[in-house]
Image (cartoon, grey):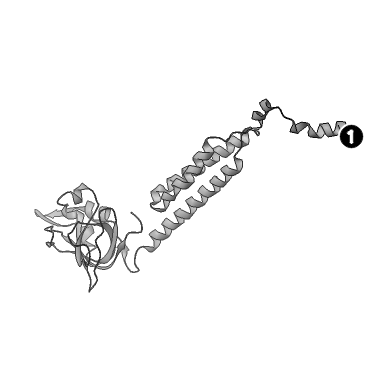
Amino acid sequence: MLAADQMTLDAPRNIAPDDQEFLYRPIPALVPVSMAFVVISLVASIWDVLLIVPLAGVIVSVIAWRQIRQSQGALSGGRLACVTLVSQALMFVGFAAMHVHSYATEVPQGYARTNFTTDISKKGFSTENGMLGIHPDVQKLVGEKVMIKGYMYPTKQMTGIKSFVLCRDNGDCCFGGQPKTTDMILVKMNGDKTVHFHDNKVMVAVSGIFKAEPTVDETGLRPVYQLDCEFFGKAKTLY
């Protein structure tokens, strides 16, 4: 009797080599894909639009987890799918909170956020009695403390810059030749403040008193708008 019981206990261990393949449970292809999304999602820390990456990773992880659950044990990797799901969700929430905080704190106290494109450039100029003039909406900004973002027009000077032309964007319209008058602002640093040059891959933010006085910059450009700048730095957000 004892011998029979011992044979029964030992039976599961004596699996034929040809039958061992049935013990393997494959992992759905979406599981390693969701793992790749965890790494790629780090780009969401750079730009808020890229939050779509961890969000897509969450969706892929959910689909992978459901595939495993519905397979009734035929597929493995459920725990790994859950880990990637939680990781993607935390990255999405964390990076979103980071971008919201940056947007909420990037404007110095006492200054108004002003969009270079919609609040200035697209307004153009007004015409009265055949004469060009400052658009009424832009005129309202004159004398106001504003914060504006843009790109520094190329200059030979790299450090100790006291003034520079801020362009609306870094495309060919501004950097391939003569920028439109409404697409540039002459920025003058207040007091003894100076700045370093940032190339057209870096958006900067300037805060100061906005003016509308035609002038000629040392680069030969002729900006109509000016800004007496008190605060200068890399833009925390791109909008």
Spot the residue most to the left: 130
Whole-percent x, y for residue 3 in the image = 87, 32
> What residue do we see at 72% from left, 29% from top?
15
Position of residue 73 relative to residue 51, above or below, is above
Residue closer to the observer: 178 or 199: 199
Quarter in which the C terminus is drawn:
bottom left
Residue closer to the observer: 67 or 141: 67
Whole-percent x, y for residue 5 in the image = 86, 33
| Horizontal arrangement in the rendering, residue 217 relative to residue 208 (left or right) | left
Position of residue 69 relative to residue 198, above or below, is above
Quarter in which the N terminus is drawn:
top right
Position of residue 109 relative to residue 80, above or below, is below
| Horizontal arrangement in the rendering, residue 102 relative to residue 26 (left or right) | left
Dot 1: what SS?
helix
- The answer to whether any part of residue 199 appears in the image is yes
Spot the residue most to the bottom: 191
Whole-percent x, y for residue 105 in the image = 39, 63
> What residue do we see at 75% from left, 32% from top?
12
Residue type, mark 1 in image: Leu
Q: Mark 1 Cα within 10 Å, few/some/many (few <14, many 20+)?
A: few
Q: How many marks?
A: 1
Spot the residue most to the right: 1
> What residue do we see at 82% from left, 32% from top?
8
| Horizontal arrangement in the rendering, residue 101 relative to residue 58 (left or right) | left
Whole-percent x, y for residue 125 in the image = 17, 54
| Horizontal arrangement in the rendering, residue 67 relative to residue 10 (left or right) | left
Q: Which residue is mark 1?
A: 2
- The answer to whether any part of residue 186 appears in the image is no
Residue closer to the observer: 153 or 36: 36
Classify residue 145 by image quadrant: bottom left
